Image (tube, grey):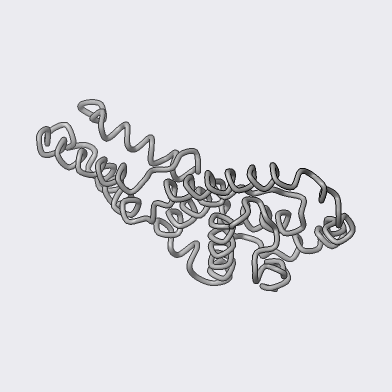
Amino acid sequence: MSHLMPEPLATWTWRLERVRNGRTVLTRAQAATARTDLVNDRAAHPADYADYEEEYATALDELEVLSRQANRHDDLLSVMAADRRAAEREAAASGTASAGGSTSASAPRSLTSLAAEHDRVAKGLPEALDQWVHRLIRYRAGVKIITPIEAARAEIRLRNEADLQPAAYRTGVAAAYYNRVIRELGEIATAERPGRRDAPGLTRGLGAALV
């Protein structure tokens, strides 16, 4: 190549790789601004982009997808702050009298049952989707905590991945897992009580429901 990749393109190519790997999250505003900056930089320095048209087109396409994603981060932070204040008021009023009241009813599912549910999950799912299928199985069994903000980030990441790779996420067996995982993550992300395990409609596991 005649010259190095233009700095703005190199920066956003690297950041988009981190988005695909789940290492960072871009808001709609960030993605839209980045796309505009790249378009303007290429218009100002067309020769610098001559050897990088494919990378440039890919970055624009991915930023366009991200710029259309629902950005729930700020709303979730507000919800979590309100929940935290409500919990503090409730604790101050009632103390800790109800601690440990129903251990038998909330005991984690047996390891044998849990292992069987993991085994029923279809093979060959996209890596990120497979990871969350198994994490949600453990969450419903009471052996894994997923916070609202963690669920929101996972939902955004999976929606981004599905938009970038629709054939992998929205067809065949993977589509059923994807739709259910997105629904469950959304319910956790907006739960009235962060970390709860009793959201409506989640009584059956993914593996059992989809075999």
Residue at 11% of width from left, 39% of height from top?
43
Q: Position of residue 139 (x, y in %)?
A: 70, 54
Along the horizontal axis of the image, is 6 left or right of 78? left
Along the horizontal axis of the image, is 186 left or right of 145? left
Residue 16 in sight from this viewpoint: yes
Position of residue 210 relative to residue 112, above or below, is below
Q: Residue furthest left?
A: 44
Determine the image quadrant of residue 68. Answer: bottom left
Along the horizontal axis of the image, is 127 left or right of 122? left
Quadrant location of the C terminus in the rendered image: bottom right
Residue at 81% of width from left, 51% of height from top?
98
Q: Nearer the viewer, residue 2 or 105?
A: 105
Q: Position of residue 170 (x, y in %)?
A: 48, 67
Quadrant location of the N terminus in the rendered image: top left
Position of residue 58 relative to residue 201, above or below, is above
Residue 111 in sight from this viewpoint: no
Along the horizontal axis of the image, is 57 left or right of 113? left
Q: Residue furthest top?
A: 3
